[in-house]
Image: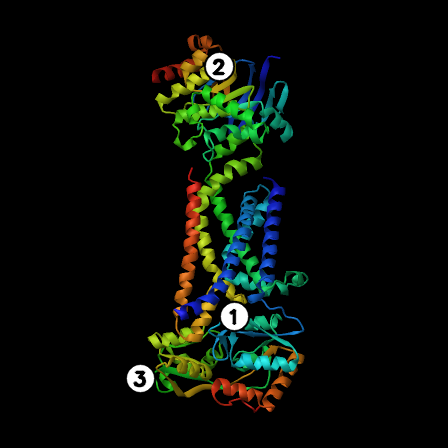
Amino acid sequence: MDYFVSVLVPMIGGLGVTLSVFAITLIASIPLGFAFTLMARSRIGVVKGFAEVYIYILRGTPLLLQLLFVYFGLPLIPGIGAALTFDRFPAACIAFGLNYAAYFAEIFRGGLLAIDKGQYEAAKVLGLTRGQTMLRVVIPQMIRVCLPSVTNETITLLKDTALVTVIGVSEVLHYAKAAVNRDANTFAFLVAAGVYLVVNFVITLIFKKLEQKYNF
Amino acid sequence: MNQIIQVSNLNKSFGDNHVLRDISFEVDRGDVVAIIGSSGSGKSTLLRCLIDLEKADGGTVCMEDKALFKDGQYGSPAEIRAIIAKMGMVFQHFNLFPNLSVRKNLELAPKVVRKEDPRTIGERCEKYLGKVGLLDKIDAMPGTLSGGEKQRVAIARALMMNPDILLFDEPTSALDPELTGEVLTVMQELAEEHMTMVVVTHEMGFARSAANKILFMDGGIILEEGSPEDIFVHPKNERTRTFLQSITRKE
Amino acid sequence: MNKKHIILMVLIACVAMIALAGCGSSSSSSSEEVKNDDQTFVVGLDDSFPPMGFRDENNNIVGFDVDLAKEAGKRMGQEVKFQVINWDTKEMELNNDKIDAIWNGLSITDERKKNMDFTKPYLENDQIIVVKNGSTIAAKADLAGKKVGCQKGSSAYTALMADSIASQIDGAKPTEFDDNVSCFQDLGSGRIDAMVVDSVVAKYYIRKNEADFKILSDNLSPEKYGVAVKKGNTEMLNKIQKAMDEMIADGTAGNISKTWFGEDIIYKGN
């Protein structure tokens, strides 16, 4: 039992980092993703093209690679490199935020496609502006359609946070590994798995509640 | 000024398909205009051009002497919005907002577009729901309503903005036959209360009893125009007669 | 929703990201971010490499190299900070000035000399072969056709691949692991037949776990540990070397060695 506690304690510290990256990524990538969704639907060629290229690149390369690029690669760009030098934790958040925005962009795009054109028309003839239509009619319906996919992405995100270890940010799994290497047994991995499952359970519960709320 | 809508030489094409060819007609205040014709004759497109759901390619549409578009040229979005504000529309597929209750469906536009006082909105909401006979459903979600109930709510929602003219795009075509009656009754009442209405419909019974002007459309033009008496009893055009026969055979 | 709204939302998201990330890093003084400035001697290490650098039961970073580095820092007149890094990216960390030195059981190899500068060696180490007791493998030649494992990015890997036996092992290359413990585990379970690893690490693991392993007398390459700095950073290198020379001369390094290995095994040659 003592051993369990001694292994768990540093992991809780790591959990703080895991949850920070998790939360910051969600808060940043959801609105950013939605912005890209709108850009990808734009009638202005340049805007639409930019959004599509962004989504293609960010989804088409490994997150691991993007992490390394943001942390090691950006500072090396001639000229603006100095301004793009980030510390480890911010670099991790930025890479994650940009990456997940691309995935959310596509999820939201699918959600919008599912919305009947008649909704926009009814709103228009009632006099609602485009913004009001989006906010009060379209987005609530889009959320309902997208929730299962968003739940999926969120759960994936929790597990992806383990990748930050590659640029030296220590989260749950890292401390588990340290304990495993020190003690030469894999008990700590079991504990780490338990930690992830508990957090996952909470996340799943929250999303279930959300689905109920949007079940109109 | 008696004319609410003036349409001259309205033209609209979808690619190679010339759907509306030089349409011209007028709607006076208090008119109930029924537009009839077979599918593909352009009836819905005509309605949608009047309320800016489609952009016309040519012609002029004026509402109370203000041009929605003149010779195919549209004004600024603000000008268009001001003209459209006086019109309301009821759709074939109801288009209620499924995420909002019946009450919220009705109150949304007056609240966010006209920023009216909540109490005034609430009273009007109850009045119009009572008028269409659905006051008891005021807090229901649209998903729980029958087709006929949805359409009546849609009519109440359109009325909430106090339109000068109401457009109906095949309002009963998506309803089971036993439910069309409740909707047509509401529309009949509106007509008797002198609401200006333009109705695209296949319900000849309604057209005969409620409308004072019938437009028969065929192949993108108004083939024949007149009172119900003129059209139903003494149709001048061969094709009008054929159409009416095919409809009555179905009835 | 027009252009302005979109731009606004993108800006808000970016600002939120950077602001929150900034908060995260400044409040993470207890976590791993280490600022590299002139007052600090930042040592990069993989904290999963006992006994050179690892975490004890209280989660503190300890180890033979850690103690040496702390002592060196004292003599260099700088505060020593330990930055946990990923072993795969250690070269990038060094070259991008994220760390000042790598001091973590780093074997001096010709390959690595191309990319970094080393101090004089301070510890002898061999790349040796570990097998289970009772294994039919008794010598290096017996590795032919067998599954061999080692740590990713390690000099064990380099030593193995440089040896002629490499082309004869199963798959012509070893199974690579993130860390040595996983490799030992697979050795114990029989998933691999043999493992190439630093003798120092093997001895620690076997003793700690009373593992049923055997170290073969054949070794792949004798090698030595050194401290590495960014290529061309002569100033830093000289500072470290001077400190180390002092530590060895006055016996401090020897004492640290006795604490960890039971004897003074500091390499004093060139």
Q: Residue flagged by tag 3: what amino acid is it? A: Gly
The quarter in which the C terminus of chain A is drawn is top left
Q: Secondary structure at mark 2?
A: helix
Which mark, residue C86?
Answer: 1
**Callout 2: few (<14), some (14-19), or many (20+) C-alpha neighbours within 10 Å?**
many
Q: Chain of mark 3?
A: C
Q: Residue furthest front?
A: A2
User: In the image, residue A106 lies at what x, y percent?
Assistant: 49, 48
Q: Chain of mark 1?
A: C
Is residue C88 shown above or below C75? above
For this rendering, which residue is in front, C52 or B198?
C52
Residue at image point 47% right, 56% down = A157
Residue at image point 55% right, 26% down = B119
**Callout 3: few (<14), some (14-19), or many (20+) C-alpha neighbours within 10 Å?**
few
Q: Is residue B14 visible?
A: no
Q: Label 2 to label 1, Cα distance in Å?
A: 78 Å
Q: Label 2 to label 3, Cα distance in Å?
A: 100 Å
Which mark, residue C134?
Answer: 3
Side of C135 relative to A106 (left or right): left
User: In the image, residue C124 lies at what x, y percent?
Assistant: 51, 87
